Amino acid sequence: MARTASKPGLLFSGSDWDFQKLSQAYEAIAALGIEELKLDTYPVQMEIISSQQMLDAYSSVGMPLMYRHWSFGKHFLYQDFLYRKGGRGLAYELVINSNPCIVYLMEENTMALQALVTAHAALGHNHFFKNNHLFRQWTDAGGILSYMEFAKSYIARCEERHGLSAVEGILDCAHALMEQGVFRYHRPPKLSSERQREGLRERLEYEERSYNDLWRTLPPSQDTSKTENKDEGLAERKKSLNLPEENLLYFLEKNSLVLEPWQREIIRIVRVVAQYFYPQRQTQVMNEGCATFVHYTLMNALFDRGQISEGAMLEVLRNHSNVIFQPAFDDPRFSGINPYALGLDMMQDIQRISTEPTAEDRDWFPDIAGRGDWRDVLLDAWANHRDESFVRQHLSPALIRKWRMFVLADQAEDAHYEVASIHNERGYQKIRAALAHSYDVGASLPDIQVVDVDLLGNRHLRLQHKVKEGVLLDSGSRDATLRHIRSLWGYEVSLAAVDAETGTTLNERSSNDC
Amino acid sequence: MPIFIDRRLNPKDKSLGNRQRFLRRAREELKRSIRDRIRTGRIADVDGEHAVPMPDRGTGEPTFNNARNSGSRQHILPGNRHFSPGDLIPKPGQGGGAGASSPGNTVSEDDFRFVLSREEVLDLFFEDLELPDMVKLNLKEILAFKPRRAGFAATGSPTNINVGRTMRNSHGRRIALRRPKQAAVDAIMQDLASLETARPNAQTRERVAALKEEIERLERRRRRIAFVDPVDIRFNRFDPCPVPNAKAVMFCLMDVSGSMGEREKDLAKRFFVLLHLFLKRRYERTEIVFIRHTHEAQEVDEETFFNCTQSGGTVVSTALEEMHRIIRQRYPASEWNIYAAQASDGDNSLSDSERCIALLNGKLMRLCQYFAYVEIIDERESHIFGATENGTSLWRAYSAIESNWPNFQMSRIATAADIYPVFRRLFAKQPALRKNA
């Protein structure tokens, strides 16, 4: 393998691939990746699959192993429909954040495409999965496959024992709350019971030491004591249940009084899957940008060294430009900002700022402009940012001008959109902030929390929706989801919409009414 | 060196279980859309794939979503050409608030059609006909195939080795490559034996050595050129070949006078569909003839048959005469298996019923493999008539025929579940027929 890398000459010729060629291409590209970009990756496991199997993988949210549920069947039918209609091509690859990193290659790909995909997925995505802090913190790449294996067989066993429809009911409910089933912040580790007793003892000691009989003689004020009492009860309850709690699935799993142990385990499985995918949602631009940047840089480097032919390079470039195609907003093909395009452009922009900065860049990015160390800047960005922070720190005015970005303010009551900012001196900061905000998953998902439940009373579960910018919930799906929560909780559930700024309650919906 | 795994040969249809779960969930709606299809489509179309719309009940996946029509938000879009801050852009009218950021011409996930396979369609069709499982299986079975010899192949299973052909090839190869025969070796061995028993002298010793060398050479050659080499082996090749079936024609007779309403026609149609499915399974080629009648009969196409009503009285014998005429003209009984299915509400004049008996007894029953008569009655009437012999004039007339001819079946139908018993005898006969074939 060292021979192929050092020997000048083509890595492959012709469009047919075989395992020998794939292996050589991988070796050459991986060596180049370490040399050129200092990539650090998990070992790679490449799996060759057919288009049918790719469709299968699509419908089970991209996991090689997944439990069975009707909604995956529905998604499969939809993907199949799009594919057959020709409305959508299939991805050339699929990569799974696991250790070893699993890369699916489609058998239909030509050799040039396989090389491109290898650079993109087996190096780009792989490096990102291994190094980005969100993935390191939240996902266990080594254990996910065996966990899914367990989940699949566990749910199959439950179906055998408790019947299809019972399991399906729980899964339906849990899927409805998947977006509210993730932890966004780490919590302090739970104290061991020994430490808890220790803490209690210390507190009592302190109270004994600082006891002063004088306090007892203070006259209690009549009118406030009642509300205080009530507040105290509320505070007590909140403390014992660790409220408010934004991970609804976690709360239901731990505290619902009507669930059987196997039902709790199923909720837990759904929760783990949701948590596993949570970093991917926050790093779309970065993840795809990183992979695209890596494949573009590496394929060009290979071509410069004469290791791939012009024909292969043309094919690579054609596919590359398809992937990063970004139509303008008024183009019929426009469907939002293409994360591949934005990510690649921003990373190439960092490269440009680092090597040939303008005066404006020196102004905006004094840390990196002209230093020439774009590799380190990128490695640092890939490791430490998510989409929101990456855009907030690295979107340059030059790129805003290149994309001709603008911000439309959309007030629901108005009949017009208003153009709020465009690519000019005043607008750069605002556009950058707005774009970063739109990538903030926490801000764009509805913020719903468990605020109160009286377990000793009527067990009425109270949820609160913090309404930001006046954006309410869609009422049809809200009611349906509430019904799902009710069936997991077993007692009345209500959801209050509370304005985040003023704290006024806008409306309240109870599961009894819907 | 990365690990490579070739998954292409793994079992396909990994998501088949998910599909089945989905279909089970959407069963009621799918059943309804298949039933609608049968009501409006052609009889022969039931036996195939169908594209159905995505059912909307029971397949929703609700989550908490932000409502599009409330609050304020910002859209960041690329490609500004001429806007300045403060410009107002009218929102596109209907079709969701954020028109510019989400052009809505893509198909939403819940709004598309997907294809049900033939098996799935038939499952849904059979559901409330209450067919016994054996019969369902029978109807769903694809045409029977019989393996037929079709030459030789170089690959195959060991049980199919053709010894004669293999040995012929081996023989030819042995001759071509000059494999020493056993006889030649034996002859030299004999020479050798006789020399060794003789007195040894210089000449014989030399000769013995030469012979031994020769034997060794021959043996080596024999070892190298195998007696039967893998390249010689030939297998019998078999082609699956459909079991030859005869042709069948199915006559659908129906009274279309005003008394036959939508419900009656729907039941009649299902009855015809079932008979057609059954015939298609047994015959390679089936044709359908539609004859409708009031006081006069005419042959029509399927569309007219089910959709047009005619005013007029009811004279059933005209339809039977028309059928007889068509048989004589186009479907000679020597070449065609003739099946007839008649649906009516039973109204007929007494004198004409006599005439029907005469026609059936005299001519038609001799020509027909099977004649099924269904009388479609009101659900309330079914309690009254139940099992009595009393009934409409046509019913009483046909009762006489039923006792004479074993291949005549008649039944009253009030609901879809009543249809199957009419066919019972037809299905019961089938296993016997298959064994004979």
Image: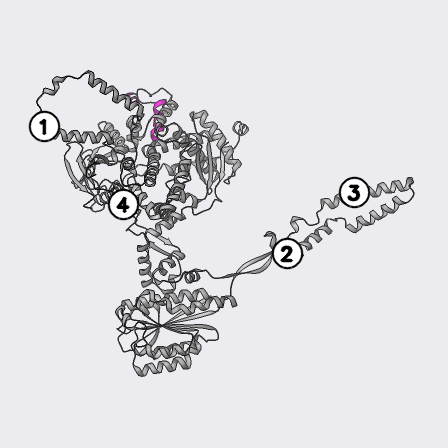
Residue beneath label 4, please? B104
Under tag 4, what secondary structure? Answer: loop
Quarter holding the N terminus of chain A? top right
Q: Chain of mark 1?
A: A
The CA span between labels 1 and 2 is 104 Å
Badges 3 and 1, same chain: no
Instruction: Tell me which amino acid carries mark 3.
Output: Glu
Residue beneath label 1, please? A224
Q: Chain of mark 3?
A: B
Q: Earlier in the sequence, mark 4 or mark 2?
A: 4
The CA span between labels 3 and 4 is 87 Å
- Disc 4 crowd rating (10 Å Cα; few below 14, some 14-19, many 20+) is some
Direction from residue A46 to residue B355 in the image, left or right: left
Instruction: Tell me which amino acid carries mark 2.
Output: Asn
The CA span between labels 4 and 1 is 57 Å
Residue beneath label 2, please? B162
Q: Which mark is residue A400?
A: none
Bounds of the magenta segment: A344-366
- Disc 3 crowd rating (10 Å Cα; few below 14, some 14-19, many 20+) is few
Residue beneath label 3, please? B216
The front one of A267 and B72 is: A267
The front one of A124 and A66 is: A66
